[in-house]
Amino acid sequence: MRLRRQKPAAVRSPQYGPAQRPSNYAYRAQRNVRSDDEVDMARRPSAPSTSKNRSGWPLGIAVLVGLGLLLFVSTLSSSPRVVYVGQTNQHALHSTQEYQAAAEQDLSSSVLSKSKITVNTKEMAQRLQARYPELASVSISLPLLGHRPVYHLELRQPAFVVESVNGSYVMADSGLIIGTKDAAPAALVASLPVITDQTGQPAKPGGYVISPASATFTATLLKLLAAKQLTVSRLTLPAGAAQEIDVNFAGKAYFVKFNTHDPDTVRTQVGTYLAVAGQGVAPAQYIDVRVPGRAYYQ
């Protein structure tokens, strides 16, 4: 008896439709598919957060308040305060009220001067000093919290009254003409020695008729003569003689010629004159001590 081998049954695939996939793939695909409503909800802009809007208001208010406070603190008043550096105003040619009025006028002339941020204190100080030559220096300080600027004025020391070809002026110890005689207080003018200028050079405030060295020489000369109890009756800048000052003494018919070029020679020249006068020399016109160590008289 012969046995037949049975063929394994063939697996038939379906003739139509897609191939079947595992069930786990279908589950994942279903998770990635969103409904139309979900897509629309995702595309809609989200409503602004109320908490964020509310938190921005206090910050904006704080910024506005800070800016307003900064503007208020930086505002400058057009009514300044005037103070004097190292001394009172007893030598001033003008009153404190006049200096203050001039500073107030300058502050009011520009919008930039209304704020500490934009004001130019250096230029304002220069303008006031140019207007009043008797001011040796001007500085302006701005208060941190206040509004009134403070003008610090340093005054020049008046030393002489100069009788010039075009009027009478007050001269500082530096030789600078600082103002007219009429503008100065009468008590101040009466206390100053008078120099008669015969050179013909006109004087004006802010200018010079003698050099600073000559002014220093003359001031030192007067102190030395006063210490010797010699009363000066007249001081003259002669015509045609540069850097010379002629001194007349009370009770003397002659005058003495001094060379004002070098202040360091003033003691030598005074010593020469005292030596000649001590010998009883009394010329009719003058004694010339301009050459160091020598005296000429006529």
Image (spheres, grey):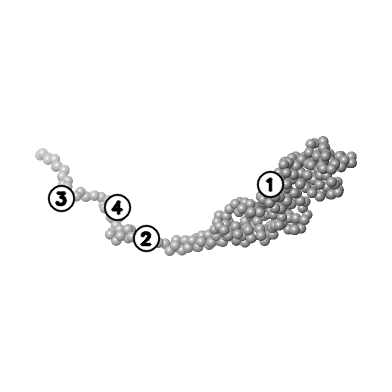
Alpha-carbon distance for marks 2 and 1?
90 Å
**Discs 2, 1 touching: Cβ within 8 Å:** no
Mark 3 Cα-neighbour bin, 10 Å: few <14, some 14–19, many ≥20: few
Alpha-carbon distance for marks 2 and 3?
48 Å
Where is residue 213 shown, x and y percent of the image? 73, 43
Residue at 40%, 61% in the rendered image: 48
Quarter where residue 298 is shown: top right
**Discs 4, 1 touching: Cβ within 8 Å:** no
Q: Name the disc covering residue 201, or none.
A: 1
N-term-proximal mark, 3 vs 1: 3
Question: Which secondary structure lies at badge 2?
Answer: loop
N-term-proximal mark, 3 vs 4: 3
Residue type at tag 2: Ser
Residue ID for mark 4: 28
Q: Name the disc covering residue 46, or none.
A: 2
Question: Which secondary structure lies at badge 1?
Answer: loop
Comparing labels 3 and 1, the label whose residue is closer to the camera:
1
Where is residue 157 shown, x and y percent of the image? 73, 51
Alpha-carbon distance for marks 3 and 4?
25 Å
Left or right of 31? Residue 141 is right
Residue nearest the viewer, comparing 159 with 84: 159
Residue type at tag 1: Gln
N-term-proximal mark, 4 vs 2: 4
Residue ID for mark 3: 16
